[in-house]
């Protein structure tokens, strides 16, 4: 019997929808009833994770735990969070419930390890980069994490916050190809789009070649953990 999946969403709303779409696409189904039961809490009251980690902003843990408990009470049997930076608080979320919580960075690191990747470029928010969410997970999997230079990281943040979240600038105004080229010149065999807004931007820009989408990795892992068949052999 398939398990009910709970999504701690709202970080941001577009990324939440993107995860749901990927779960649906990765579930082998010929009718509605073959799909997973998904309960989503699009909790936009969760404070900004990067602001909290780097500048002492409002603590997101209470709202994260609130969403986790709400989803468990509603019948969720496993939880996922479509926000990479929020995994800095993974232990706090997992401790608030009695059901499994999948970890996006650990799942992604395992995929890279199994593919024989030795070095990966990590594109993420400042909070994710400096918190070590991916650095730790990749190191444990034997994969070297490479990050953009400071000027390039500023452009990554523009793409995430002004390009996707706020829709205040054209995505093409960010020199994404330069960021990719720099990381590949430094030895990155694959690029990890380690912010849930980035797959949306890269797909729109047509720059997904050689990129691993942790949102897709998380969706793939959730489908398998929930006991459904997948439409693909792996999350690539």
Image (cartoon, rainbow, N blue to C red):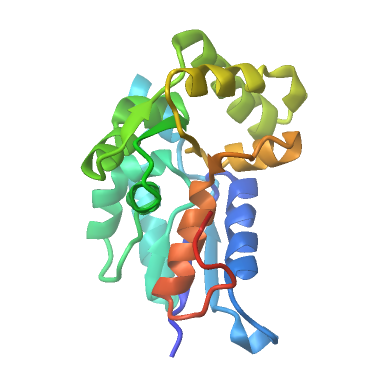
Q: Is residue 94 found left or right of 172 in the rendered image?
A: left
Of 57 and 205, the residue lying toward us: 205
Of 173 and 73, the residue lying toward us: 173
What x and y, as percent, mark residue 151? 51, 8
Residue sitting at the far front: 116
- The quarter of the picture where residue 117 lies is top left
Quarter of the image for the N terminus: give it.
bottom left
Q: How many marks?
A: 0
The answer to whether residue 57 is seen in the rendering is no
Residue sitting at the far top: 151
- In percent of the image, x 38 and y 57: which residue is there? 66
What x and y, as percent, mark residue 72? 38, 71
Of 141 and 3, the residue lying toward us: 141
The answer to whether residue 174 is seen in the rendering is yes
Q: Is residue 176 found left or right of 80 in the rendered image?
A: right
Of 200 and 115, the residue lying toward us: 115
The image shows residue 109, relative to residue 26, as above or below, that is: above
- In percent of the image, x 68 and y 19: which residue is there? 174
The image shows residue 153, relative to residue 104, as above or below, that is: above
- The quarter of the picture where residue 77 lies is bottom left
The image shows residue 216, relative to residue 50, as above or below, that is: below
What x and y, as percent, mark residue 113? 33, 48
Q: Is residue 210 found left or right of 94 in the rendered image?
A: right
- In percent of the image, x 38 and y 61: which residue is there? 68
What x and y, as percent, mark residue 101? 33, 62
- In percent of the image, x 63 and y 88: which residue is there? 33
């Amino acid at each position: 019997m398939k398990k009910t999946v709970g999504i701690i969403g709202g970080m941001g709303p577009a990324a939440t929808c993107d995860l749901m779409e990927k779960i649906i696409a990765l579930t082998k189904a010929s009718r509605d009833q073959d799909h997973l039961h998904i309960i989503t809490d699009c909790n936009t009251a969760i404070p900004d994770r990067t602001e909290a980690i780097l500048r002492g902003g409002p603590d997101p843990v209470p709202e994260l735990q609130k969403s986790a408990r709400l989803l468990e009470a509603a019948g969720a049997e496993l939880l996922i969070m479509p926000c990479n930076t929020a995994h800095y608080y993974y232990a706090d979320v997992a401790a608030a419930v009695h059901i499994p919580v999948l970890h996006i960075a650990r799942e992604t690191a395992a995929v890279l390890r199994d593919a024989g990747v030795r070095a990966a470029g990590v594109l993420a928010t400042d909070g994710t980069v400096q918190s070590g969410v991916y650095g730790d997970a990749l190191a444990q999997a034997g994969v070297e994490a490479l990050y953009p230079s400071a000027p390039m990281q500023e452009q990554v943040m523009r793409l995430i916050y002004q390009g996707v979240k706020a829709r205040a600038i054209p995505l093409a105004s960010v020199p994404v190809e330069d960021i990719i080229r720099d990381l590949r010149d430094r030895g990155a065999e694959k690029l990890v789009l380690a912010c849930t807004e980035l797959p949306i931007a890269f797909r729109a820009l047509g720059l997904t070649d050689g990129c691993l989408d942790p949102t897709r990795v998380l969706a793939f892992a959730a489908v398998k953990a929930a006991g459904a068949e997948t439409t693909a052999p792996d999350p690539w």
